[in-house]
Structures are given as C-alpha cells and as structure tokens.
Image: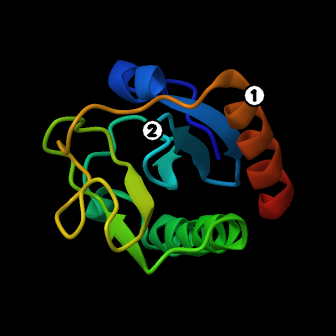
C-alpha cells in the first residue's frame, strides 16, 4: 500500500533504523538505547492526522500498532507501553510505541525532549533489528 510520492521525513530518517515494512506502515527503531521505542509511519504522502487516513487504513494502522507493540513486548520487559501520535515537530503522520520502565531516563514524564539520545552501538542495534524482524513475522 505504498504511495509512489511517499518520502520519509528527514528527521525520522536521521533518528531511526528501518525494521520492516508491513502492509501499510514502515516500522522504524528509534536509535535511542535508553528506551525500547518503535515508530510506525504509513507509506502514504500528505498524511498528517490519523483522520487523514481512510477508515480501512485507520483500522489497518491500529492492527499494525498492536503487532509492533506485541513484538516490542516480546523483546523487553517494561512497566508501561506508551503510544503517541503527536506531530508537533515532525508533521508526517507517525505513531510512537515506547516501552517505559519506572526510573528510566524520562520517568514519569514523556520521552520526547528528555535529554540527549544515547545511540545503540552497532552490534546491539544489528541484533535488536534482527530480533524485531523475527518477532514481526
């Protein structure tokens, strides 16, 4: 369900690594080892708000968010799963799926704007990407 004109926002491209392409969304891993954090981006140009998607695509988006949430939960233990579709800085429609632990670097506040990201080392991110890809199959 890709739109030929679709392009990933440069900020998302810079801050993430591609995990997988589902039917509607690309699943991205935020390159911040402080938090288990996925971002889902529908591959349709011009989407800003959830209501910009057709009803069928809204349903598919939430199915894919659930699938990504389950994949993340299979890899990490955390106390709470946060979902968000803010878009105040990156207007392109995207949904965050973030595993939170009491006492993490931003607890109990939001992860957005909480300190500087701690990038994964190459070995860890390669392993994490493979585990997520397997969990999403």
Residue with the mark numbered 2: 32
Instruction: Describe the element under mark 1 as helix, strand or loop.
Output: helix
Q: Position of residue 79 (x, y in %)?
A: 44, 80
Circle number at residue 50 = none
Dividing the picture into quarters, in which one does residue 77 lie?
bottom right
> Image check: 89 left or right of 15?
left
What percent of the width, then of the height, locates residue 131?
80, 52
- Point out the image quarter for the C terminus: bottom right
Q: Is residue 8 visible?
A: no
Give neighbour class at mark 2: few <14, some 14-19, many 20+ (Cα, 10 Å): some
Residue 123 circle label: 1
**Going by the picture, which residue comes out furthest to the bottom?**
79
The quadrant in which residue 123 appears is top right
Report the front residue among 67 and 116.
116
Q: Is residue 45 above or below residue 75?
A: above
Q: Is residue 47 visible?
A: yes
- Quick one: SS at disc 2? loop
């Amino acid at each position: 369900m890709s739109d030929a004109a679709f392009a990933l926002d440069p900020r998302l491209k810079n801050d993430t690594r591609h995990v997988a392409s589902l039917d509607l969304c690309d699943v991205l891993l935020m390159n911040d080892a402080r938090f288990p954090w996925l971002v889902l981006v529908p591959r349709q140009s011009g989407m800003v708000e959830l209501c910009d998607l057709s009803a069928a695509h809204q349903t598919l988006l939430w199915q894919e968010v659930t699938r990504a949430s389950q994949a993340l939960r299979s890899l990490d233990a955390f106390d709470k799963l946060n979902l968000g579709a803010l878009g105040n800085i990156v207007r392109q429609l995207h949904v965050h799926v973030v595993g939170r632990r009491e006492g993490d670097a931003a607890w109990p506040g939001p992860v957005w704007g909480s300190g500087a990201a701690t990038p994964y080392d190459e070995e860890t991110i390669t392993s994490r990407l493979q585990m997520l890809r397997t969990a999403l199959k």
